[in-house]
Image (cartoon, rainbow, N blue to C red):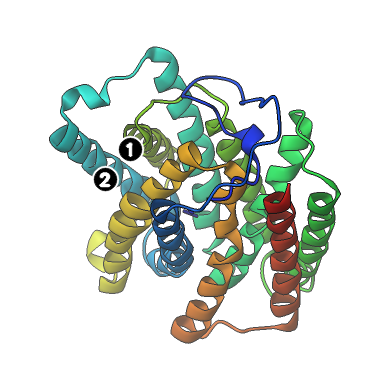
Amino acid sequence: MTSPAVDPAPETRPAAPGPGPRTPAAPAPARRISGAVWAALGIVYVVWGSTYLGIRIVVETLPPFLSGGARFVTAGLLLAAIVAWRQGPAALRVTRRELGSAVLVGLLLILGGNGLVVLAETSIPSGLAALLVAAVPVWVVLLRTVLGDRPGPGAYGGVLLGFAGLGVLTVPGLSGEVKIGGVLLVLVAALLWSVGSVSSARLSMPANPFTASAYEMLAGGLAALALGLLRGEHHGLDLGAVSGRSWAALAYLVVFGSLVAFTAYAWLLQTAPVSLAATYAYVNPVVAVLLGALVLNEALTWPILLGGAIVVGGVCLIVSTERRG
């Protein structure tokens, strides 16, 4: 799980780094999509779509939380070094409050959101996991409603469609084709990722989005390593028995899935509305399903195709409604 001018939901975006949402006195005019936002969206759309395949290959011979933790700790250290090199060590300085916010968001996004997806992919296909995660914008709309925003009837129609699609996508688990536990893990992961995404737009985060990403990845990665050790994933682990393609997939996830795409997503969360950043969720599944079928020969069953189409349709409705809002 690892996004993307028109400003479809200006009320969810802070006017400056600091707590609380921006509350405009009058409806904000439509904004053109900048080249930088398009580039970040493209990176997250395509690269994160491929990470589901990468994760599935990694967990073939590596334990889930230890591999996920190693991925993000490595990426966080590399990103922190790059920030210090390009902008000076002072760029890594944050207040205690900003550090606490970054740690909280990192735990929600990486330990909760990404970590549970990695665990789930030990038992369910990568394409199905991606389609279940596609419901992130549905959860975002509900969370915004709880926090006092009113996305509009179109968005709520998209929510209903999204939940209908999720119902169809759970059929493989209910019928025994895949483990229902894996399906439920991804649903919880999507909810935690949504909470982290919404929180990052409302908490007092580090002003530099790359610094924020580094601390988020370090916090989430260290927590994943600790959880992996608590689960005993190190017992019987033979690094010599790990396949070459699992190592290659882990390296890909570190460089592209974490350093490149996660940083682009964090930048979007601070420069674009969270509802726009969340639109990666209806492109990622298409990429993930195609790659899973082509590379791993994952079956394209009717619940996956139909449920995925319904979820993507609901997300498109949410996004198109907010673009007009």
Label 1 secondary element? helix
In the rendered structure, the answer to whether residue 56 lies left or right of residue 319 reads left
**Image coordinates for residue 9, horizontal then vertical, percent:** 65, 41
Does residue 57 lie above or below 63 as drawn?
A: below
Q: Nearer the viewer, residue 79 or 232?
A: 79
Label 2 secondary element? helix
Q: Amino acid at mark 1?
A: Phe
Q: Nearer the viewer, residue 263 or 230?
A: 263
In percent of the image, x 71 and y 46: which residue is there? 139
Query: Quadrant location of residue 157?
Result: bottom right
Q: Are marks 1 and 2 in contact (CB under 8 Å)?
A: no
Check disc 2 and report the residue beneath it.
74
In the rendered structure, the answer to whether residue 162 lies left or right of residue 17 reads right
| Mark sitting on residue 210 | 1
**Image coordinates for residue 23, horizontal then vertical, percent:** 66, 25
| Mark sitting on residue 138 | none
In percent of the image, x 52 and y 72: which residue is there? 288
**Image coordinates for residue 136, horizontal then vertical, percent:** 64, 51
Q: Amino acid at mark 2?
A: Thr
